Image (cartoon, rainbow, N blue to C red):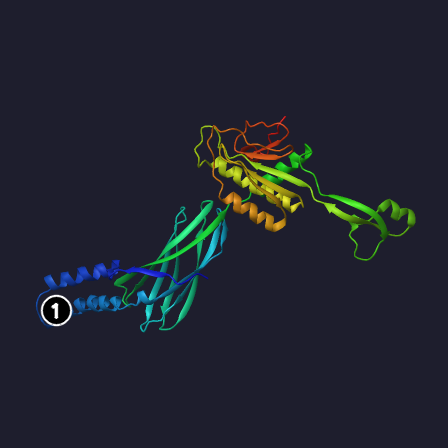
Amino acid sequence: MSAPAAVLRVGPPAPTPVGTIALVAAVSVGVLCPRGPLADLLVAFVTALPAVAYVLCWRVELRKLEVRRRLPSTATKGEALSITHEVRHPGRRLIRDLVLTEDHPGGGGSSATFFAALLPGARGEARARMFAAQRGHLPLERLRAVAGDPFGLFVRVAHLRLATEVLVHPKPARSAAALALGLARRQGAVGSPETEWVGVREGRTGDPLRLVHWPLSARRGAPVVRVAARTRPMLGHVVLDRRPPVGAGRGSQAFEKAVSLAAGVVLELLARGIEVDLRIPGAPGEDDLVVEGLRGREGGGQALDVLALVTPSAADGPPPRAPAGALVVTAREELRLPRAVVLSADAARRQRVGAAA
């Protein structure tokens, strides 16, 4: 839970569309209505109503509101995340129809929560959905609190500052990655964890069938299972080519597909029990970013954190450096690297894998 929002400024009451009609009607009645007791009463009513509404709206205690925001620290590109606004009203007057709105960057539009009524001293919370449209840091800095008078003629707006940041991960292309790894495995680039067996023992209830030594069990006439000393995890090297396709911009969709495929490849390898080293080539003259020893769910989270912030390099830069047997994910179809398997984002989408000679 974040600290309470700081109130930057509170504007004066502004008329709503209904309030604008009421003001125009009041002026029109005052100017055009003929004189007489009933006419004077009508003029007094249509003039007093906006005046009373303005005063009531001015007395809304938005400056005293305590607003907090609750949301996850990470999100996935192209998916919605839940955001919760918690409000405490320490003032002395009722606040009606309170709306908290966040205009966040990245093309995600606005996220708003609604509170029908806040009594003095009351607390409330409401949830909204926020769309994460781009990878990287999603900064959330300001909110707008809007409340009005009981008649709906005027609203008052308070601008609040509440800085928070969400790290948006790429959406892993798991299906394309599974297909690409299946074809890469046929080339010997992807193996399975190796198990060292040290002996056998009599089978017991609950032993997995995969441990049963079937030939020996058949000869003895009783279940016999293998005993494993340890399982040696396989090591997979994943390299992301940061160069976009020739002629494409630095923010091309092809590069985004390559990042999603790289994320899917890493998660698929980890799900198969394979330890992963992830390499992100650096700019010319800089060292590569290498994240070694990724394992399990925690390793997958670390890989997604790194891939969330990766940016494309110059299109005419040198090809990435890759160790022997590495899986190189690229947005280019023409890339060929010796002793490495190239996984093209576009080729994976069309169910093809470009393999190096």
Q: Residues within 10 Å of mark 1 (few under 14, many from 20)?
A: some
Q: Which residue is mark 1?
A: 39
Name the residue type under label 1: Ala
User: Along the line of sight, which residue is nearer the eye, 155 or 4?
Assistant: 4
Left or right of 6 on screen, residue 302: right
Quadrant for the C terminus, please: top right
> Going by the image, does 95 lie left or right of 292?
left
Name the residue furthest left: 35
Locate residue 37, reporting x and y percent. 10, 72
User: Relative to 93, is 178 above or below?
Assistant: above
Q: Quadrant of residue 13?
A: bottom left
Q: Quadrant of residue 149?
A: bottom left
Number of disc labels = 1
Q: Residue at x 78, y 48 (%)?
A: 229
Helix, strand or loop status at disc 1: helix
On the image, the x and y values in percent for residue 354 come to: 59, 30
The reply, left or right, for residue 233 in relation to residue 327 is right
**Vertical comparison of 177 with 118: above or below:** above
- Residue 38 found in image quarter: bottom left
Does 51 sit above or below residue 182? below
Q: Residue at x 18, y 67 (%)?
A: 46
Residue farthest right in this picture: 220
Q: Position of residue 126 (x, y in %)?
A: 43, 63
Find residue 163 and report its horizontal and vertical position in percent. 40, 55
Using the image as rendered, state which of residue 336 and residue 352 is in the foreground. 336
